[in-house]
Amino acid sequence: MSYWWILLNVFAFWGLSQGLLCYCLVRHQLPVLWIMPLGEEPGRGNITAEVLPAVQMALHHLSEQPPPLGNYELQFQLTDSECNNAKALKAFLDATFYGPKPLMVFGGVCPSVTSIIAQSLEAWNLVQLSFAVTAPSLANKRFPNFFSMVPSDSAVNLALVRFLRQYGWNRVGTLTQNDQKFKEVQKDLSGHLEVANIQLVAAESFSEALCDGVQKLKENDVRIVIAYIDVRLAAEVLCCAYNLSMYGLKYQWILPYWTQDSPLWTITDINNCPTNNILTAMEGSISAGFQTLSSRHIRGISGRKPQEYESEYDNEQQLSKFHGFAYDGTWVIAKVLTRVMETVRYRERYNIHRNFTVTDQEMSEMILEAIEKINFFGVTGQVMFLKGERVANVQFAQYQDGKAVTMGKYKTMTDELEITSPVQFQGAEPTKDRTHVYRQRKRISIFLYSIISCLTVSGILTACGLLVFNVKNRNHWSISMSSPFLNTLIVLGALLCYLCIFFLGLDGSYISDQALEASCSVQIWLLSIGCTAAFGTMFAKTWRIHAILKTDRIEKRITKDHGLTLLVLFLLLFDLSLLICLQVLDPLRRTVKEYQIQPDPHGRDFSIQPFSDHCENTHMGFWIAAFYSFKGILLLSTGFLVWTKRHVNTPSINDIRGIRISLFVSGPVILIGTYAPMLFQEQPNVQFCIIALVIITCCLSTLGMLFVPKILIIRMGPTALSRRHPTQWDRELEPESEEHCKEEDFRKQRNSGASDYVIDIKHNISATLDSRLSDNLRLQRRIAKLDSELEYLTRRLNESRPNLLENPVIRISVHKAGKNKCLTLPERSSYRRNLLEDINSPEHIQRRLSLQFPILHHAYLPSIGGVDSSPVNSSHDIRKQNMMPETGEVLMPKP
């Protein structure tokens, strides 16, 4: 009995174990809707066919897992979305109504289709997990029931911004393919760049003529180019970059990550662009993208290392960058649904209500809670989600020597960039984000400034010497006749203009900006006052001659200095008024004038921005017109007066000859100095040289024409400047016929007023004062001889007084106070003959004493500037009689 009992128990235990085994072999199916395009998609290929082996591999590996994962089986209901919004939505509704209701939605490739379905998930109490959508528009809070296994392009953009900041690139441009997906990525990048304060210089998009977009990037001097293009167009873009020389040392291309793994070199016949050209343009390019497989040698949830999975997947002869995410996504769905189903079963078993059921909303909430707690290591790395987006590292790679080399990664959780291999730039330093422009000041050459300064110092010393000469010889007739005070004003004006040259040659390389602004005001004050003092004084001198010559009355021919001084002071006050208005209302400021950017002459990777310092104000044109008008009117008026009196050439009376020559020299030079610098605006050295030489030439000509004649008169004698005929006064003393004297008297009476003045100027004042001094000395010697003869004759007359015979007389013209007097004197030869015949004649002696000698002493001699009518007692009296008129008076004949 015991034997059968034991045998029965053995069979019972065996049967129970077989029953349990059969129960364990029955796996609960979990329906999942898989929405994918089954056909090939342009630019992407057939993603479903490429990732299907990875999904099947995941299901196989799940079947090998122990409970509770091994107790459930995912049942994928594959639905074709055709990347069409309407068809995809209809397929989703049909699968929901007619098939077993899915617990989750898996897949999604096309952003537009995925976005429409994601918007309706919450209403259907479903949760979707995608492994191929990277559009930034789906990675936001509008889709709380949507999760992505792949890091979105928004995360890649954050990594790109961090990479740009790592190398100091603050200026970039984008080249975007005219596709909705790429446009969304580029728009998201623009927002991140703005937050990071990185300038987006140009955002070019293209559909057909992609080389035009590349050309525009070059025209905008974009050095860092971020391209959003698919594999099909990447080779064409690189070909355009090669043809436009947008590669190498000066440019850095950042391409999509998949271009590094794509065999672009196998694409031929792209716009007749050889493969070597494409590879040359691609050399050194950088890509940023998510890490498709982890590089860590760690066994994941499936018990396999990523490297083991990769070798197993490669045996399937399928190529897709999303296969690892599809594999890990399958594991995520299995773990989430297993956890939810285990929770539901636990509640059903221990709930007090026997008819316990779970609603769709509760199921959805449980799935959301479970998926947010997912955290395991898969073949793509650590799998976890943050606000519906996969938290993963972004990998950076560089194309070096024909292959992609990983150089670093970006950790999304910590916002850290880890560089494992340095970036190999084609230059000695990282590529510059722009054509660096080095500002180069166009300064005045120190050599030129030294030469001009030496010339200016020479001019200043000369002017100072002339000033001393003018003061020292102020009592000399040649200085006193031309008004020493006015001469001093001209010299001081020239000195102010000379001093202005020193400030013109200063720029920011020698003095500070504040000092340069002060120098701007000093320049305009010195030059303006100096010109007014010099040319205003010349205008006053010319006006004096004009006032003398225009009057018909002889009484108004004497002009004093104080009137001319007041005229010059009026001109200076007007000039000062303009300068004060300029200084108060719109002062000159330092401004920087930039010129055209020039490439480096040595071929280095930077350009040169020339600039120079200028003195400008807000209304520069108005003030220039005001000052030029004032100075121009002054010069034109002086020139007009000089031209009208061009026939007056008497240096003893005025300086009109010197002023005329000075204006003829200064006028054209000033015009050249006004317009020539405008032709050389980009050459400060030429401008400074022209302006300085104009100032020096005008000052030198003015001072030279004013003082050189006076120096010659004083240093070389009275006849140094203008020599008269030595017998001029002898000719005047020669006998003239009575008819001639009558004609002279009639002509003098007929011509009055201005004609009388002109005749006086022609016959009397035309002989320079220098000639009169020479003649005066000669006449003094003649008078002394006549005095000796008079003494001899007096003695003879005292001895005998015979009757004087009648002697023939002739008329001789004697000048007295500017009027001709015809006097009768005996002819010298007849007089001597009669005197010898009857020297003791009392009548002869009486006539001689009463008529001839008083006329000779009292009428003739004073009229020619000789001795006084009083007897000449000493040499002191003779010198006293030779003194010239007072300063400022014009030597004119008196009526």
Image (cartoon, rainbow, N blue to C red):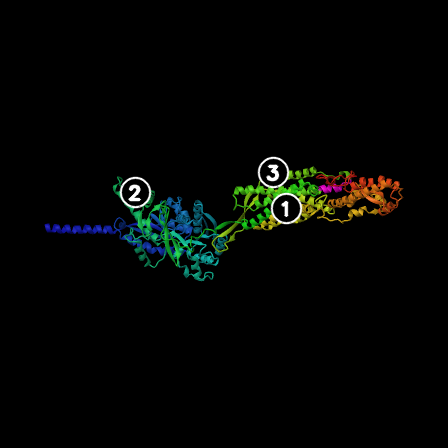
In the rendered image, residue 460, in percent from the top left (x then y), is placed at 60, 45
* Label 3 element class: helix
| Count of marks placed on residues | 3
The majority secondary structure of the magenta stretch comes to helix
* Residue 230 sits above or below residue 893 on the image: below
Q: Which mark's residue is nearer the viewer, 3 or 1?
A: 1
Q: Residues within 10 Å of mark 1 (few under 14, many from 20)?
A: many
Residue kind at label 3, given as amino acid type: Ile
Q: Residues within 10 Å of mark 3 (few under 14, many from 20)?
A: few
Which residue does the numbered mark 3 point to in the structure image?
A: 580
**Spatial separation of the CA atoms under disc 1 and disc 2:** 113 Å
Residue kind at label 2, given as amino acid type: Thr
In the picture, the disc for residue 699 is 1
Asked whether disc 2 touches disc 3, contact meaning CB atoms under 8 Å apart, the reply is no
Residue kind at label 1, given as amino acid type: Cys
Of 458 and 620, the residue lying toward us: 458
**Spatial separation of the CA atoms under disc 2 and disc 3:** 98 Å
Q: Which mark's residue is nearer the viewer, 2 or 3?
A: 3
Q: Is residue 311 left or right of residue 787?
A: left
Tell which circle, 3 or 1, labels the residue nearer the N-terminal end: 3
* Label 2 element class: loop
Which residue does the numbered mark 2 point to in the structure image?
A: 357
Residue 81 visible somewhere in the drawing? no
